[in-house]
Image (cartoon, helix red, strand yellow):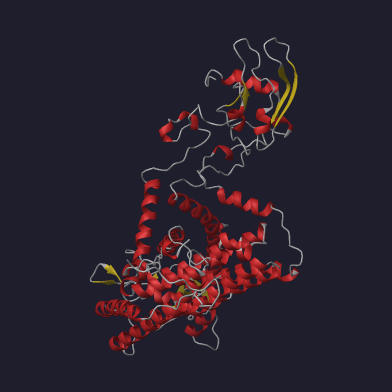
Amino acid sequence: MKDSDVIVLEEPKLSLGDQFYLPQVLIGLGTTMKHMLNVVVRGKDRVIQYPEERREDLPVEKGGMLLKTYRGVHRLNKDEEGRVKCVACFMCSTACPAHCIHIEAAESPWADREKYPAKFDIDELRCIYCGMCEEACPVDAIELTHLYDIVGLTRQEMVFDKAKLLNIFDETVKKEPM
Amino acid sequence: MLDRIINWWTTNIPPWVLIALIVHGTIMLTVAYLILLERKVASWVQDRIGPNRVGLGFGIIPVLKDWKMNGFGQPLADGVKFILKEDYRPAGADKVLFTIAPGLMVLVIIISIAVLPWGGIRQTQRTLHLPPGGMTLHDSAVAQLAQGDEMVGEPVSLGNDNYQVTYRYPFQIASLNIGVLYILAVLSLSVYGVVIGGWASNNKYSFLGALRATTNMISYEIPLGLAVLCIVVMYGSLDLGSLVEKQCHNWIGIIPAWNVFCQPLAFTMFLICIHAEANRAPFDTAEAEQELVGGYHTEYSAMRFALFFLGEYAGMITTSAVCVALFFGGWDFPGLRGHADHPAVTSNLIICILRAVVFFTKTVAIIFVFMWVRWSLPRFRFDQLMMLAWRALIPISLALLMMTAIVVVCFKGDSYDFVGGSMALTLLGANIFVGALIAIISTLIPPAPLTNRRLTVVGSRYSKTPLPLAS
């Protein structure tokens, strides 16, 4: 770096009103009062009252949910014949930053593919819902759905196995096609 | 039966006991609800709604759980949380001091509630038994009344040595004639709770926070006292009840004679100082969450933290109440005044209660201003805080006190009556004059030296590079 590259800035000079601080304080108080009156009198708050109003019911412009891109809980897709699409290539498991996908491959009973997952566990509590697995999959087998309110009473309950993930597919494929 | 109980109560128990119980209960309940108000106000400023679901039913009590309270059960939930949390003490903390620090702060602030002027003076009658003895009738009646009560007229005989006595008592817990001094003195003691809490926590950050809080509170007590003095000098009395009474008239028929209209600069300084005393934003470096975790109350959990919290809010209530009493006419409201000569005196209990309600409402309004300011202003840096107190507020308050004293001497000389319209205008002019003086002088003061001066170190790679030539 040369000396001629250095730009020397001076602090902006405070106006008299700024120096006294109180006039600017009053302007600031006015801004906050405007926000308070907007919320209390005109009801312009940004709050979604959760159990009564849900985010997916709102239009996208008003803070709703874009179903195609929302990253909720995972599902394993099935093809037209009802077979699981996953070929147990381990790409999602490798891509996962939280190491929450555990796959056991087995020889596939169908002719057109070599492997299929015998076990496919995702620990939904470790998952960070980043979508890397969805991006990594070469056969579009794993997808993140729009479901976000999955709860459980134990940690073991929230480790979803293959059957559960395929079940989620059956539940959500109508609202959110592949 | 009820008659007998009421009779026994009014003859044997002085009125301040009931007032004390009601006021104490109300203040404690208000402190709990202030936590909710703070959260609501914070939410409104941030374009959201605060807690609006908590009711009283804990979700399971059959009748209560369906009563929609829109968030007003939140203080109960907070209280239960504070009681049931794990209460630990860090290793190495001083056993005794750690325990008593929050209690010390709360104790001191609750004591200071005693002198607030809630309802003026009430005139009422009572039946006394005055057997003939050595003293005159008048003196023996006065001996039976409480100290501080004033007898009106002479005892009226009811036969059988029973006399009906008309007397006046102040409708507050204690009517000290040094009321303002008492409150200032007692509120200064709340610093002890903070500094002992920070020291006893055995934690660097707590200690730093406590140190900052101490210097903060001590520095701002001087301009606080001086701003209060500006009002006291006008009326010649430290008694809060009489300070309120002297504001109960109108100038030009419609403007109430409140001190905020004739001394706005003193009011502004008082407001700034009570913000600093309560360690509230923008003066809250002592508990700045970004810097000091929690400051002096980092290591406290559960009930002890609740006591610190309560102490802070109760301090806010007390200082707001003093602000209202000094500057906004206390319980004054058109229609609630008594006679023009003694506006505080009334014989109607309902009027006294209404006055207390008005006083309380005004206090809550000032507390709302506390919260409004918290969410509007950035925090002061610690040296800016100190400079504001010592280099700005103390000279201003001294100048204001001098001007007030000059005006008072010119207008009143020796008597302390109601403040007339011309005196009020002169005081307003004096305030504006001091404000203009500050404006002029502040432009003449040379700027503070740079805090990071560049040292020229000859021959080192950190030597000053010459500035680029303007081209």
Vertical placement of residue A49 versus B125, above or below: above
Residue lying at 74% horizontally and 67% vertically, measured from the top left:
B93
Of the pair B237 and B135, the residue shown nearer to us: B237
Vertical placement of residue B418 versus B302, above or below: below
Vertical placement of residue A40 versus B180, above or below: above
Side of B449 relative to A41 (left or right): right
Q: Quadrant of residue B351?
A: bottom left
The reply to whether residue B171 is visible in this rendering is no
The image shows residue B388 at horizontal and vertical percentages of 45, 75
Side of B468 relative to B85 (left or right): left
The image shows residue B133 at horizontal and vertical percentages of 55, 86
Residue lying at 23% horizontally and 71% vertically, measured from the top left:
B252
The image shows residue A164 at horizontal and vertical percentages of 68, 22
Of the pair B160 and B329, the residue shown nearer to us: B329
Side of B97 relative to B129 (left or right): right
The reply to whether residue B288 is visible in this rendering is yes
Quadrant for the C terminus of chain A in the image = top right
